[in-house]
Image (cartoon, rainbow, N blue to C red):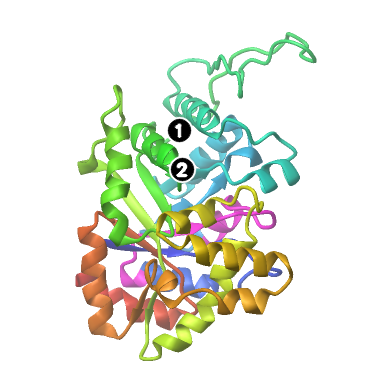
Amino acid sequence: MRFGLQLGYWGAQPPANAVELVAAAEETGFDAVFTAESWGSDAFTPLAWWGSGTRRVRLGTSVVQLSARTPTATAMAALSLDHLSGGRAILGLGVSGPQVVEGWYGQPFGKPLARTREYVGVVRRVLAREAPVVSAGPHYPLPLRGPGATGLGKPLKPITHPLRADLPIWLGAEGPKNVALTAEIADGWLAIYYTPRLAGMYNEWLDEGFARPGARRTRADFEIAATAQVILTDDVAGELDRLRPFSALYIGGMGAEELNFHAEVYRRMGYGEAVDEITALFRSGRKEAAAAAVPDQLILDTTIIGDEAHVREQLGVWEKAGVTMLLVGARDADQVRRLAPLLGH
């Protein structure tokens, strides 16, 4: 198993120490660096800027939102980054949720599985550059026909020859149908709120995708990259208290009350009553109470927190569960350097 550095998306301001974090990841043997986007900073620009100071680590998006760009625009950004990095790009994609898709991008959220399949298909045709790119739609028709179209559009091939036709595409997926689709059409799964104790359930979802006719990968050459806090500390209780507000935000506030994919992940873990309580408190404005309602074990299920012996033991558990990479956040470069030696657990 390997480590990836998860830089995420920006808050109110860009992170002050990102350059130092990326340099530490490059120097200490991390396999990759990832950026994300929500409705502020984008994923590609920081990745290209910070990645320009590296020569070895892979550069990935975790994730680029489908609705932020047409599939051809995303393919253009990915092939550009791949050239500039000498073939180190990983294109991580995700559908986001209805609040962002309809509220920020002004697009309908419906049929996320069909949109994902069609989107990835267009991106792959751009990267293959075997013929002018066409798509029957219905979500991303190329060329555009029908009402509002001039009828002058023509199928095009990318002017720039992609460096790699097989540039890896990983999908962020949380539910059973989306995970199965990921196993069928993608090169890797970007798993959020992964817990090893449910590995059997995840494997059933993945195996459904691997078994489909025309599946792109098998388990042997498929990557599972799980985002997880890995924290070396003797103060487990203190770290749990620090993480509680973040858990409350994603469970109670990151998504519509009627459709919150993050909350559903925790329901599948068996925390339905806690999710209901946290959501009710958070949406009534009682954010501190919502954080206090987050059970310790809910956090511990999806993180690795403890002294070096405990962390090494848990890394083995996650690897045995099938995780090939842990995407970890770090507060400073020293934390990256402390984690790096554990790669040889």
Residue range of the region highlighted in magenta in the rendering: 27-50
Residue 136 in view, yes or no = yes
Q: Which mark is residue 138?
A: none
| Helix, strand or loop status at disc 1 | loop
Q: Which amino acid does the dot numbered 2 rest on?
A: His
Q: Which amino acid does the dot numbered 1 rest on?
A: Pro
Q: Position of residue 165 (x, y in %)?
A: 39, 31
Residue visible at 19% across and 72% down in the picture: 345
| Helix, strand or loop status at disc 2 | helix
Residue 326 is covered by the magenta coloring = no
The residue under label 2 is 83
Residue 35 is covered by the magenta coloring = yes
In the drawing, does residue 56 fall left or right of residue 6? left
Q: Are marks 2 and 1 in contact (CB under 8 Å)?
A: yes
The residue under label 1 is 162
Residue visible at 64% across and 48% down in the picture: 258
Is 160 located above or below residue 261 in the figure?
above
- Crowd rating for badge 2 (residues with CA inside 10 Å; few <14, some 14–19, many 20+): some
Number of numbered discs visible in the structure rendering: 2
Placement of the N terminus among the 4 image quadrants: bottom left
Residue visible at 42% across and 83% down in the picture: 334
Q: Position of residue 185 (x, y in %)?
A: 38, 32
